[in-house]
Amino acid sequence: MAELGTPDKTTPVTPAHRPTPKFALDESLYGLDAVESAFFKQQTGIQDDAELKEHLLQIQADAYEIYPYPCIRRFAWTKLKISRLFPYQQFLKLGKERDGAVYLDIGCCFGNDARKAIADGYPVQNVITSDLHQGFWDLGHKLFKSSPETFPVPFIAGDAFSPSHLEIVPPFTLASPPTTQKPDLSALTSLNPLHGHVSAIHASAFFHLFSEEQQLHLARALAGLLSPEPGSMIFGAHGSLPEKGFRLSLISGEKGMFCHSPDSWTELWDGVVFEKGTVKVETVLTQQERMQEVTQLAPGTVFYLLTWSVTRL
């Protein structure tokens, strides 16, 4: 059996999504606030509210056929979540002040977070994205009425558990920096050439899709991409609990989502993934109101969101 976090390289791990019931889409869940509406109007060129709604509903329906993620059903992709995370301003500052600061958005779906960051000033030439499903990225071009020519951010489809796409390597340090040159982002066919060259990684609604062992694997894999320069960061948000464990599920007989707590998440990064004391981990746990039929929570279950950042010292 492979060591925890280093699976047998001859058999790439397939993301073990829990069985996902495909609830009917519900138009009543749609709703943009003023900031979201302005962003989508500016990005799509659609100024009429009714026309914009119809456009977004069609994108949702098409995406739901690719994979019925609850976040697609509840329009989480319209909420500009990256810009509402506490590390966002630190991330933008890094992108504007560090020359050539590569930003990877992993689990990027339509690329809406990458587009928001670029709209807010992150240099477009330093952005790269990746997801398991090519179809989501293609729908992003349909959503934003763009093309690879008008929005030339590279996208790499791939399984983050496959060593041919993202192999685990030990985190680089200032004493032991990467020996390779930063690659041409537009020429990449996997994430592996980026080892040690990424300044910022955003991963939201991503880790919580997987088991505890797989989350450790992902953390180690992303850590190997991170530049050893102080200030390099990984950040995001996902489902959590005050004490680590499993959240109850609506799916009878199935274990629910595995959730780290703020303490266990901090311990994972500071001491297991990175040498203790070499990173600063910040977390914010918030309780959120969510409809059970939207989030697939069992009755009485409370939803907690963990917002977090890991910054190299």
Image: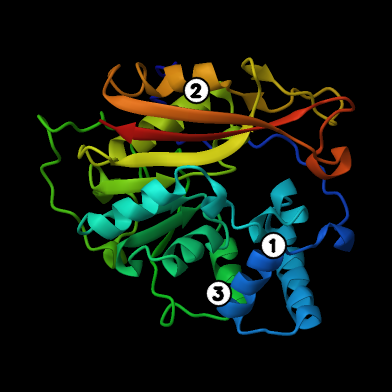
Secondary element at image label 3? helix
Residue position marked by numbered label 1 in the rendering: 63
Secondary element at image label 1? helix
Spatial distance from mark 3 to mark 2, Cα to Cα?
34 Å
Spatial distance from mark 1 to mark 3, Cα to Cα?
12 Å
Along the line of sight, the residue nearer the viewer: 309 or 132? 309
Three-letter amino acid code of the residue under disc 3: His
Along the line of sight, the residue nearer the viewer: 293 or 36? 36
Secondary element at image label 2? helix
As drawn, the label of residue 141 is 3
Three-letter amino acid code of the residue under disc 1: Ala
Q: Nearer the viewer, mark 1 or mark 2?
A: 2
Quadrant position of residue 21: top right
Q: Is residue 12 left or right of residue 223?
A: right
Ranked by sequence position, the earlier of labels 3 and 2 is 3
Ranked by sequence position, the earlier of labels 1 and 2 is 1
Residue position marked by numbered label 2 in the rendering: 265
